[in-house]
Amino acid sequence: MTKVVGNGPGHAKAGGRAAGTPNKATADARAAIGLFVDGNAHRLTDWLDKVSNGDEENGVKPNPEKAFAMFQSVVEYHVPKLARSEITGADGGAVEHSLKVVFGKD
């Protein structure tokens, strides 16, 4: 027995969520991560400071690069990365600019 998925070839998709809309599980996961980050921001600052400045008591040497990398890894789950976009002129060529400067009254 063959299972038919969707409306078949040549038919438009009907129903479901719009393209680009995250599913419920993704939205829930992002919300949970956001709540965790927001609720632990004061602790996160202390942890990052200990990594950046070092913590002699616990034998941690200063490592500001690692602290920054850790910060970025947390932020990227809470704030999505922006997509890279390229702006081109006609037929994919260079964008042309023009500027007219007028001094005094004509």
Image (spheres, rainbow, N blue to C red):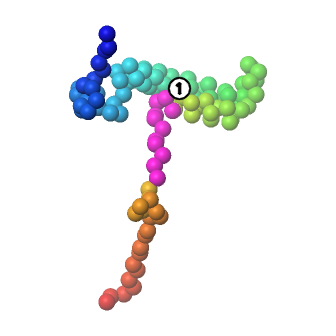
Q: Residue at (67%, 28%) from the top-left corner?
A: 51
Please tell me in which quadrant of the rendered image residue 4 appears. top left
Q: In the displayed structure, would residue 1 be above or below residue 52?
A: above
Q: Is residue 84 magenta?
A: yes
Give the residue at mark 1. 42
The quadrant of the picture occupied by the N terminus is top left
Instruction: Describe the element under mark 1 as helix, strand or loop.
Output: helix
The mark tally for this picture is 1
**Image side of residue 68 versus residue 61, left or right:** left
In this view, the residue in front, 78 or 22, is 22
Residue at the top extreme? 1
Q: Position of residue 42 (x, y in %)?
A: 53, 26
Question: Does residue 80 show up magenta in the picture?
Answer: yes
What's the residue at 49%, 29% (across, down)? 77
Amino acid bearing label 1: His
Classified by dominant secondary structure, the portion drawn in magenta counts as loop
What span is colored magenta in the figure?
76-86
Q: Is 56 situated left or right of 26 in this image?
A: right
Residue at 57% x, 34% y is 72
- Crowding near the residue tagged with mark 1, few <14, some 14–19, many ≥20 C-alpha atoms within 10 Å: few
